Image (tube, grey):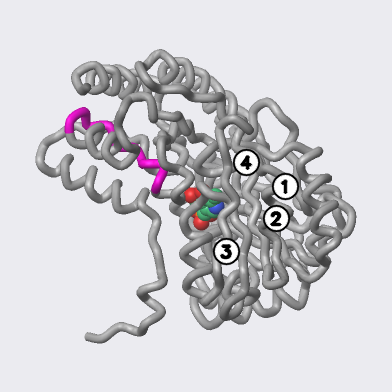
Amino acid sequence: MKLAGRMGRLGTETAFSVLQKAKALEARGQEIIHLEIGEPDFDTPGHVVEAGCRALREGKTRYTPTAGIPELRAAIAGDVSRSRGVPVDPEQVVVTPGGKPIMFFAILALVGEGDEVLLPNPSFPIYESMVDFAGGRPVPLPLRQENGFRFDLDEFRAGLSERTKLVILNSPANPTGGVLTPKDMRELAGILRERPDVAVLSDEIYSRLIYDAPFASIASEPGMGPDGRTVILDGFSKTYAMTGWRIGYGVMPKPLAEQVAKLQVNSNSCTAAASQYAALAALEGPQDDVGRMLEEFRARRDLIVSGLNDLPGVECIAPQGAFYAFPRIRETGRGADDLADLLLNEAGVACLSGTAFGRHGEGHLRLSYAASRENIVRALERMGDVLARTP
Ligand code: PLP
């Protein structure tokens, strides 16, 4: 079968292929500690599960409006309006199966042949994959440990060209755990204000998973709101431990929301009804579980960061958000791909090479600490053994 040429431009997400490799090793009897996949290991809060089940029992088992049930769109509009301090009309909201389709749809709707897209590197690999697929040209903005994995503003300015169509931001960030400060946002907005033709995709999926700093969104800056040129991507997967429910959303200018909904009607039709009712309960119900999960993530972060810094040749700064540690492993004398393979095959620790997130991820590993403290301690011990054994 001869595939269309565009398929050669589509990338993938390494986390899923490493998970498959790890599962194959497990099937052969090896015990694996999973630090590769980015999903909370907690159960979805009970009242949210109950709302989903109730919806099914009440016969909410049919198609819904393409952009989502009106109650959920209104609740999201209210929540985003409060948390980002901007007016949001429910018609600006499109509910999708996970936040990922917002990336896919917004990029397809905005980026044409030869358009340039400024994006962080290392970053979530789907950004670059989607830009390539759409025929655009990804322009990488290096993120460095020395700078807390924040942008260098001069590099940001220099990355903008006549052809720039879109800028992608992700704070708190996958894979680095870096967070852009309110001052960063002000400065970025200052630069972007000179370029009103450039759209922004702000991936805020980890907006509630932030430890030490306040959350800042570019959309809160004057002239940068989701009624103008910013698409806010957020969702329920990470905040409410709902990865398998497949539900997320985008908030964007109304004309773009109409196009994104059109892409949705051409693909998924709508998001599963029960997941939408569960998400409504997540937003409107008690938020205690979110706070509890955050505190547990904080304890695991402190544990993994101090354990990593005790390993020879490993240096890890404390991630400010999300649930990934991104240690520098250059001094171990091994490349990131090599070390990630070695840890999986020889120590049964599944994690990702930094190169899975772009070439500036070389010299780093990504370890998800959405795993029990016990498993984090065992993984650190095994890593210590491997590093002690290898030259
Ligand atoms: N954005 C980032 C940066 C992510 O890390 C992820 C998931 O790993 C997503 C978006 C998509 O999440 P979902 O589609 O499960 O809502």
Marks 3 and 4 sit apart, C-alpha to C-alpha, by: 16 Å
As rendered, which of 224 and 270 lies closer to the eye? 224
Q: Is residue 66 visible?
A: no
- How many neighbours does mark 2 have within 10 angstroms: few (below 14), some (14-19), or many (20 or more)? few
Q: What residue lies at 55% left-to-right and 73% top-to-bottom?
A: 136
Distance between mark 2 and mark 3 Cα atoms: 24 Å
SS for callout 1: helix
Tell me where the magenta segment starts and ends, as one range.
346-355
Q: Residue furthest right?
A: 222
Q: Which residue is mark 3?
A: 103
- Distance between the alpha carbons at the discs numbered 3 and 1: 26 Å
**44 or 331, which lies in front?**
331
Q: Does the segment drawn in magenta span residue 308?
A: no
The residue that disc 1 covers is 154
Question: Residue at (80%, 58%) from the top-left corner?
Answer: 192
Q: Position of residue 314 (x, y in %)?
A: 40, 22
Q: Secondary structure at mark 3?
A: helix
Q: Is mark 3 within 8 Å of ligand 1?
A: yes
Picture residue at 25% right of the left edge, 32% below the top: 343
Q: Is residue 93 above or below residue 35?
A: below
Q: Nearer the viewer, mark 3 or mark 1?
A: 1
Mark 2 or 3, which is nearer the eye?
2
In the image, is 11 to the left or to the right of 18? right
User: Which amino acid, by three-letter code, is at mark 3?
Assistant: Met
